[in-house]
Image: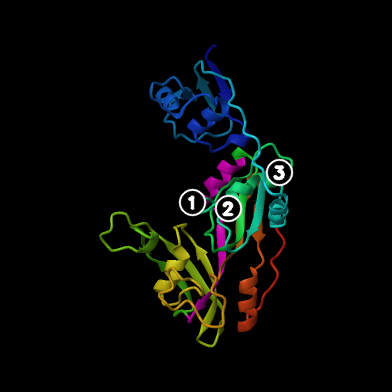
């Protein structure tokens, strides 16, 4: 074995160096990667770098002798055929690198305590003949429906994740809230913090001296209203904090209909579905291969029913468009 230099491919843009090395040399542990970077045995462009360095296409990576035996690839996880067909029907866009779903209300994106059935456990059903299993690049709450983006290759996953980190993704949510916000449109700039309790964690407005507070910003606009009882809102989060939209709307006095966690006891209204009325309506983002990608998702059944009862228009989602 000898020292070699490998060039980073276009599909590997923005991947961390440690993940890139472990992809090419699966037998190498994270501890070994850290030591190789620390001692300068692995270099990028001739320079010492940290294991967390993000690579760009064409970067020359110096690699010392490493065990090259690939780790065996796990077989695709078996997915019930009926569940696979149901999942495939949720696809609203697909190309060689990107896929988007209209995630239904109530489906968890990932597993956790007491969660056995979740989207991440079903992703092998969405290979559509591709060698790689699709990867999640962002999250939606279990009770939030709407546009969910997946990457079909590791390189695309890294580039999409960079877009979300850099706020290059425009997100629009629709929500039915109890009451009418004053003013009807504006910006909520309210720092949030995580509170840990015996019955689970939740998000809350941060106190001025909270060292763990994080910035959370939401633009909102009232699209329609039913007297003073309910409003249809367009919510555009400029940051991506856990439960940000739910906390922000509750704090301005208009909790999201059906939000039993943050609704201050006002979100459950007799005659309406008790499910959360929050829907990721649209995403607009740079496509990894160039141009922009615009995605939109139709409303879930419980929100269509509420829209009808309140007289709100229920336009069909525009078809996905790349331009």
- Magenta segment, which residues? 156-180
Res 176 → quadrant: bottom right
Q: Disc 1 versus disc 3: distance between alpha carbons?
A: 30 Å
**Could you tell me if the residues under marks 1 and 2 are in contact, i.e. CB atoms within 8 Å?**
yes
Residue under the point 56% across and 53% down: 109
Residue 110 horizontal side relative to residue 287, left or right: left
Residue 9 x, y percent position in the rendering: 61, 31
Residue 200 horizontal side relative to residue 149, left or right: left
Q: Disc 2 versus disc 3: distance between alpha carbons?
A: 24 Å
Residue under the point 72% across and 57% down: 89
Q: Earlier in the sequence, mark 1 or mark 2?
A: 1
Q: Which residue is mark 3?
A: 96
**Could you tell me if the residues under marks 1 and 3 are in contact, i.e. CB atoms within 8 Å?**
no
- Tag 2: Cα neighbours inside 10 Å, few (<14), some, or many (≥20)? some
Res 266 → quadrant: bottom left
Q: Which residue is mark 2?
A: 118
SS class, disc 1: loop
Q: Earlier in the sequence, mark 2 or mark 3?
A: 3
Q: Which mark is residue 112?
A: 1
Q: Which label lies toward us, 2 or 3?
A: 2
Quadrant occupied by the N terminus: top right
Residue 32 x, y percent position in the rendering: 43, 24
Residue 137 lies, with reference to residue 242, above or below; the image says above
Residue under the point 59% across and 24% down: 70
Residue 191 vs residue 140, the one in the foreground = 140
* 5 magenta-colored: no
Taking the view exactly as shown, the residue that stands out farthest to the left is 209
Q: Disc 1 versus disc 2: distance between alpha carbons?
A: 9 Å
Q: Which label lies toward us, 1 or 3?
A: 1
SS class, disc 3: loop
């Amino acid at each position: 074995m000898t020292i070699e230099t490998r060039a980073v491919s276009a599909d590997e843009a923005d991947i961390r160096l440690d993940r890139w090395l472990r992809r090419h040399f699966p037998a190498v542990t994270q501890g070994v990667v850290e030591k190789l970077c620390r001692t300068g045995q692995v270099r990028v462009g001739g320079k010492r770098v940290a294991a967390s360095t993000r690579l760009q296409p064409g970067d020359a990576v110096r690699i010392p002798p490493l065990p090259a035996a690939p780790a065996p690839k796990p077989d695709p996880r078996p997915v019930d055929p009926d569940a696979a067909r149901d999942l495939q029907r949720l696809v609203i866009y697909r190309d060689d690198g990107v896929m988007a779903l209209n995630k239904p209300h109530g489906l968890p994106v990932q597993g956790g305590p007491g969660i056995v059935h979740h989207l991440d456990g079903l992703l092998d059903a969405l290979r559509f003949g591709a060698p790689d299993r699709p990867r999640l690049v962002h999250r939606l709450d279990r009770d939030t429906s709407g546009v969910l983006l997946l990457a079909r290759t590791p390189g695309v996953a890294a580039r999409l994740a960079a877009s979300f980190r850099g706020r290059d993704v425009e997100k629009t949510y629709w929500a039915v809230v109890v009451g009418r916000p004053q003013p009807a449109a504006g910006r909520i700039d309210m720092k949030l913090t995580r509170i840990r309790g015996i019955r689970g964690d939740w998000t809350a407005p941060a106190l001025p001296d909270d060292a763990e507070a994080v910035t959370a910003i939401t633009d909102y606009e009232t699209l329609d209203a039913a007297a003073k009882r309910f409003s249809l809102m367009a919510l555009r989060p400029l940051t991506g904090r856990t439960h940000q939209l739910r906390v922000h709307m509750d704090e301005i006095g208009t909790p999201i209909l059906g939000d039993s966690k943050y609704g201050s006891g006002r979100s459950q209204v007799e005659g309406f579905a008790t499910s959360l009325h929050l829907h990721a309506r649209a995403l607009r983002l740079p496509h990894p291969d160039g141009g922009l990608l615009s995605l939109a998702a139709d409303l879930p059944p419980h929100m269509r029913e509420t829209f009808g009862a309140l007289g709100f228009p229920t336009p069909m989602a525009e078809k996905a468009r790349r331009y």
